[in-house]
Image (cartoon, helix red, strand yellow):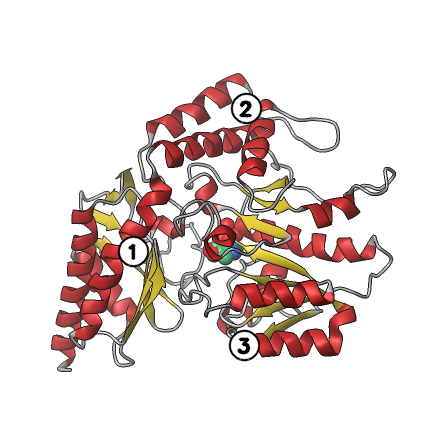
Amino acid sequence: MDLPPFLHPFARPNAERFIEIVRGEGALVWDDEGHEYVDALASLWYCVAGHGRSEIADAVGEQLRTLDAFHTFELFTNPAAERLTSELADLAPMDDARVFLTNSGSEAVDTAMKLTRLFWAWQGLPERSVIVSRDRAYHGVTYGGTSAQGLAPNKEHWGELLGGVVQVHADSLEEVERQLAEHGDRIAAVITEPVQGAGGVFPPVDGYLQGLRELCDRTGALLVFDEVITGFGRLGTWWGAQRYGVTPDLVTFAKGVTSGYQPLGGVLVGPRVREVLEADDQRWFRHGFTYSGHPAACAAASANLAVLRGDGLLERAPEVGARLGPGLQAIVDDGLAAGVRGTDGIWALALHPEDSALVVRDEMLALGVIPRPIATHSLAFCPPLVITDEQLDRTVDATRNALASVRDRAGA
Ligand SMILES: Cc1ncc(COP(=O)(O)O)c(C=O)c1O
């Protein structure tokens, strides 16, 4: 078999057919054969600012021409990293945050998990190391994130995962309460996405995040929000924490921080964790990535933040939801799909059990729209927030027409 050298992520190793995306503009992308698509998932949930933003590309080019890169371990820093971390600290949903930088969401999650354990170890309580996470959670693919995520197929065949990670039913506060009551003196932290994303797009049930905060306050456990998808405007606010009025102790981010123009992630470190980190002048924080604080990535992020502000994209998220949500709901009302979940700029359409999300997706590609088939037998929609109303309508129409023809063909 003649397979290409590129071994693709989250793909069948034997797959032979790929769509080569060669250009993008706003919420549209084009393949090498000239087909136009609406990018209905902002690539992989990240392209908030839309494609083809020359101001971000220019900021990266200018940075690379001035200083390509220089590491930030121990003694060194650079103006782009200083500027970005100060901007992010100002935007953070907690007071007096500091910012640790990574290259990806998975690394951000691993960093946050390590920080929660360090927080207790440096207070003389290393046994307080258990991390509670939820079913349906997606926290990335490193061993930490694989252990903390709640999607079974992603956790299989990798050997022994990280010990001391306990998974609870996704919507049950009672189960978290029980864990904390029985093992509270061993629980370091609870980690959750404010809106579960890749696991199916599940907004929190009423009071869930507030309840987690109260339970953590009562027992001392840290609360970690994984905002890799929900940060940077997706929910109409800078952070899901603000959207739901809950202040976490740590926040992980990636994706929308640069809209994907460069790989970048990180962790916002709130005052409670800071106090422990900074308590002893002799201690070293022995963690970091070669490219933590890479100036080109930081320059992309600062330019991207300026675009999000300048274009009023946070305000656009609820408008996107007000058009996309009812559009998808009408498809359900007509019997073509089973249900809709979502809020603001992030949605999922649950299909009927007899319809394949992959087949419907392929049909939609032929109609010029790229959604993403995800867990729970659904199609996800999370477009660039620069998407136009016409492009949103095109997305909904393609979804409806694809479902109708797939169901027609199957004689449903
Ligand atoms: C909530 C959440 N956490 C972590 C990750 C992992 O991020 P990355 O793929 O950049 O490692 C993702 C990716 O989709 C995510 O949605």
Residue 47 visible in the shown view: yes
Three-letter code, disc 1: Gly
Res. 195 mark: none
- Among the two numbered marks 3 and 1 on one chain, the one whose residue lies closer to the N terminus: 3
Query: In the rendered view, does 400 fall on the left or right side of 44?
Result: left
Residue 321 falls in image quadrant? bottom left
Res. 321 mark: 1
Which dot, 1 or 2, sits closer to the camera?
1
The residue to which callout 3 is attached is 172
Distance from label 3 to label 1 (Cα)? 26 Å
Q: Residue at x 66, y 47 (%)?
A: 270
Q: Residues within 10 Å of mark 2 (few under 14, many from 20)?
A: few
Q: Looking at mark 1, is its residue's CB closer than 8 Å to ligand 1?
A: no
Three-letter code, disc 2: Asp
Asked if disc 3 and disc 1 are in contact, CB closer than 8 Å, the reply is no
Query: In the rendered view, does 91 fall on the left or right side of 237?
Result: right
Query: In the rendered view, does 126 fall on the left or right side of 310?
Result: right
- Among the two numbered marks 1 and 2 on one chain, the one whose residue lies closer to the N terminus: 2
Q: What residue occupies the far top of the structure in this picture? A: 66
Q: Position of residue 5 (x, y in %)?
A: 42, 50
